[in-house]
Image (cartoon, rainbow, N blue to C red):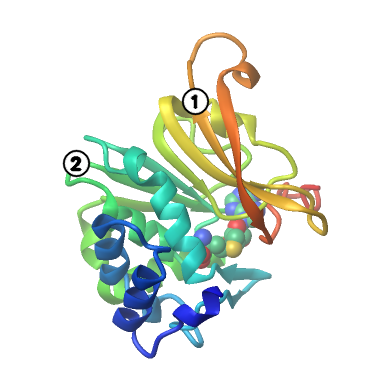
Amino acid sequence: MAWRCSGRTNDELITNLRNANIIQTSAIEEAMRAADRGNFAPGNPYDDCPQPIGYSATISAPHMHAYALEWLKDAATEDGAKILDVGCGSGYLAVALARLAPENGKVYAIDYIPELVQMSIANTQKADSDLLSSEKLQYSQGDGWAGLPDAGPFSAIHVGAAAAAVPLALVGQLRPGGRMICPVGPRFGTQYLMQIDRTTDEGPVEESFTSTRLMGVRYVPLVQPGGGGGD
Ligand code: SAH
């Protein structure tokens, strides 16, 4: 009954998510209170459901952001954490991750649509411009299937769009012990949010991780830029 978490303000939304035990830890509560969804969702920002942001993209529902942050918490809060947000869309989760990360942490956020990169920057400038001036959060245009090999290895990777199969290039950019949360499945079929834990950086990448199915989900596809729907 996630819709019950909707609020009239950001604080009320976060309080409801915490009372429903979807937000389980104070660190996530603080990060989500600091990132006001009103700066990122064009309409009904405090409803607990996804909202369209244009370009066939949506800002995910608040409860999905909360789950993703909880599952990434340990990796994203370690000393010097390097975090990659793939498919940053509105910029919301990139900002929440930057608020969660330690002082010496850094978030890289990419989207393949340049207008959405610009939207993320504009949304972040409204109340979180300190993250841009300090370069704790850095946006760029990029393809999520390829990731950001020069910036890694990452402690934590969040993928905000459903990949047809586990993106191995991204797995290869996780440090051993690092974690990726990624929806996997076909565009119109059953998708699951997967937790990918990198176990080693030796040997073939496809044998270097464990995967855990977290929940059934519906995300927009992680497209192959220039090559169709990714499924
Ligand atoms: N986390 C975002 C989700 C946006 S929707 C938010 O809550 O606002 C998913 C995003 O993935 C879209 O912005 C879409 O443009 C992006 N996307 C899809 N395929 C991609 C790819 N191959 N590389 C990078 N971004 C991609």
- Residue ID at (47%, 53%): 68
Using the numbered discs, state the Cα–Cα distance from disc 1 to disc 2 in whole angstroms: 22 Å
Image label count: 2
Q: Residues within 10 Å of mark 1 (few under 14, many from 20)?
A: many
Badge 2, how many Cα within 10 Å: few under 14, some, many 20+?
few
Amino acid on which disc 1 is placed: Arg
Say which residue label 1 marks: 198
Residue 114 falls in image quadrant: bottom right
> Which amino acid lies under the numbered mark 2 shown in the image of this protein?
Asn
Outermost residue, top direction?
Answer: 203
Compared with 78, 58 (above or below) is below
Residue found at x 40% / y 54%: 69
Q: Which residue is mark 2?
A: 104
On screen, residue 9 versus residue 222, left or right, reads left
The one nearer the camera, 128 or 96, is 96
* Percent position of residue 199, x then y: 48, 20
Decide: is 62 above or below 87. Answer: below
Q: Earlier in the sequence, mark 1 or mark 2?
A: 2
4 relative to 107 in the view: left or right: right
In terms of image quarters, where does ligand 1 lie? bottom right
Q: Is residue 143 visible?
A: no
| Marks 1 and 2 in Cβ contact (< 8 Å) | no
- Indicate the quadrant containing the N terminus: top left, top right, bottom left or bottom right: bottom right
